[in-house]
Image: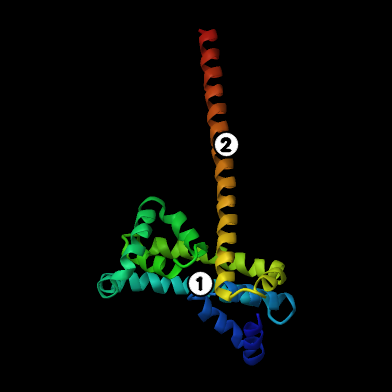
């Protein structure tokens, strides 16, 4: 928290540009603490949100471009990353949209995932659209979470390293997101089954009416 406050004091409005650059790489804990500073009146929360959204979106778009243009060369030069890419490719084949929406919330795989998606056959227009939505969700989650619960996170960080706090935040937000998806998914399935049942009952009633008329 202290290094974020120091950056705000030293840079003023340039802090939003720093946020843009920082979130292009990672920056979850950074955004949480910056949002806490906004809660205390040191920053504009909407400007912070836009900077985090834009930085996250542009950063992953850049990683996608790197994967699309230089992916094969990267694997040849850094063969250690290939095992990390295998599960990403597997997930992409089955759940491209869901994976792109969620990988920001998985600790330690964001940048590698962006490169891996670029190496896949996914059209860049499709990635750009989903990436924009994913960055919006990510920025809203961490800016909103920091603004509302930043004090709790600051106390968590009191006796722990920032990396560990970041990992805990990733786990928490991913769990919340997964629970949300499960709830929404269950609701959609129940609604579809109810509509199918009602349509079937309606059709059966119409068929019965036709037989009676005959």
The residue at the far front in this view is 159
Identify the residue position indicated by label 1 in the image: 56
Question: Looking at the picture, how far across and down is residue 104, in whole percent?
Answer: 50, 65
Q: In front here: 122 or 172?
A: 172
Residue 141, compared with residue 95, is above or below; it is below
Q: Which residue appears at 35% of the width and 54% of the height?
A: 90
The CA span between labels 1 and 2 is 35 Å
Residue 150, position as x, y percentages in the image: 69, 71
Given the current orientation, which residue lies at the most extreme right position? 40
In the rendered image, the residue lying farthest to the bottom is 10
In the foreground, 126 or 207: 126
Numbered tag placed on residue 190 in the rendering: 2
Residue 203 drawn above or below residue 183:
above
**Quarter holding the N terminus?**
bottom right
Residue at image position (72%, 71%) is: 151
Of residues 103 and 158, the one drawn nearer to the viewer in this rendering: 158
Question: Can you give x and y, in whole percent of width and height, for residue 195 in the image?
Answer: 56, 32
Quarter of the view holding residue 89: bottom left
Question: Which quarter of the figure has residue 120?
Answer: bottom left
Report helix, strand or loop for mark 2.
Answer: helix
- Total label count? 2
- Which of 210/110 is in front? 110
Label 1 Cα neighbours within 10 Å, binned few <14 / some 14-19 / many ≥20:
many
| Numbered label attached to residue 78 | none
């Amino acid at each position: 928290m202290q290094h974020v406050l120091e950056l705000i004091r030293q840079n003023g409005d340039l802090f939003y540009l720093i946020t843009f650059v920082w979130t292009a790489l990672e920056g979850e804990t950074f955004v949480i603490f910056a949002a806490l500073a906004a809660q205390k009146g040191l920053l504009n929360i909407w400007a912070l949100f836009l900077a985090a959204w834009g930085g996250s979106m542009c950063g992953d778009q850049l990683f996608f471009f790197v994967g699309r243009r230089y992916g094969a060369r990267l694997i040849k030069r850094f063969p250690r990353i290939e095992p990390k890419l295998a599960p990403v490719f597997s997930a992409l084949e089955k759940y491209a949209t869901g994976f792109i929406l969620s990988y920001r919330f998985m600790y330690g795989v964001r940048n590698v995932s962006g490169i891996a998606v670029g190496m896949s056959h996914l059209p860049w227009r499709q990635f750009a659209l989903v990436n924009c939505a994913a960055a919006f969700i990510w920025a809203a989650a961490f800016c909103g979470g920091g603004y509302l619960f930043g004090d709790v996170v600051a106390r968590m960080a009191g006796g722990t390293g920032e990396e560990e706090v970041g990992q805990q935040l990733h786990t928490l937000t991913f769990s919340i997101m997964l629970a949300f998806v499960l709830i929404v998914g269950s609701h959609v399935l129940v609604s579809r089954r109810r509509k199918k049942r009602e349509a079937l009952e309606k059709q059966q009633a119409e068929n019965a009416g036709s037989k009676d008329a005959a």
